[in-house]
Amino acid sequence: MKNTTNERFYEKYAWIIFLVIGVMVMAGGIPHMLGINTDPALVESISGQSIDDIKLSSPNFFNLYNFYFSGGGLSDIGFAFFLIIISLTAYRKGQKWSWYALWFVPAFFLAWIFLSLPLPNESQSSLLPPLIVLIVLSLVGLLLPIKKFFPKQKKPNL
């Protein structure tokens, strides 16, 4: 679908919202992939121990934790990569399949909210605000250009 001249600014540039989300997720995923925990207070609020205490008291458990933590970072990078590529190409061009595909983004972050519900309240308070912001941003990125992806059909003249 080609960009038309009567396209509104927010319809034309809504793809930037997904690009920004992708860059933010990528920036957060890189340290995690490298095993760098950027929120050690979260680990302590969940486990009752610091990361260093876990490493000293149970090296095998720490290795398991670090494996999953780094794997999660790698998954974040993969998610961000595809989000960036889709937003820069198909979504920017107005290809309808990309609009449907990007509904995965708010669903993904909503799933993270449900995963965090069993955690202690202190842990939830550091996780929920950024997740809610990402959900709202992704919904805005999907709804602003809705007319671009679903233009009104002109009725034929009889």
Image (cartoon, grey):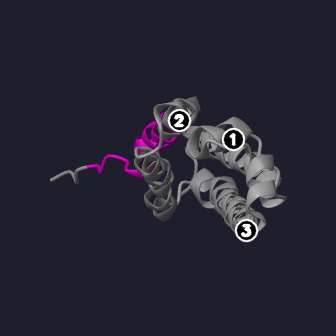
| Label 2 CA crowd tier, 10 Å (few <14, some 14–19, many 20+) | some
| Residue positioned 50% across, 48% down in the render | 109
Q: Amino acid at mark 1?
A: Val
Q: Position of residue 72 (x, y in %)?
A: 66, 61
- Find the magenta span and give its range: 136-154
Q: Label 1 neighbourhood size at 10 Å, few (<14), some (14-19), many (20+)?
A: some
Q: Between 124 and 155, which is closer to the camera in this rendering?
A: 124
Q: Residue at x 70, y 60 (%)?
A: 69
Whether tag 1 and tag 2 are in contact, CB under 8 A, the answer is: yes
Taking the magenta stretch, the answer to whether it contains residue 140 is: yes
User: Where residue 84 sits: x, y (%)?
Assistant: 69, 55
Earlier in the chain: of badge 3 and badge 1, it is 1
Residue identified by numbered label 1: 20
**Residue 18 versus residue 11: which sits nearer the camera?**
18
Main secondary structure of the magenta stretch: helix
Q: Is residue 133 visible?
A: yes
Tell me the residue that label 2 is attached to.
Answer: 137
- Residue annotated with mark 3: 67
Asked which quadrant contains residue 57, the reply is bottom right
Measuring from the top left, give residue 53's x and y in whole percent. Answer: 77, 48
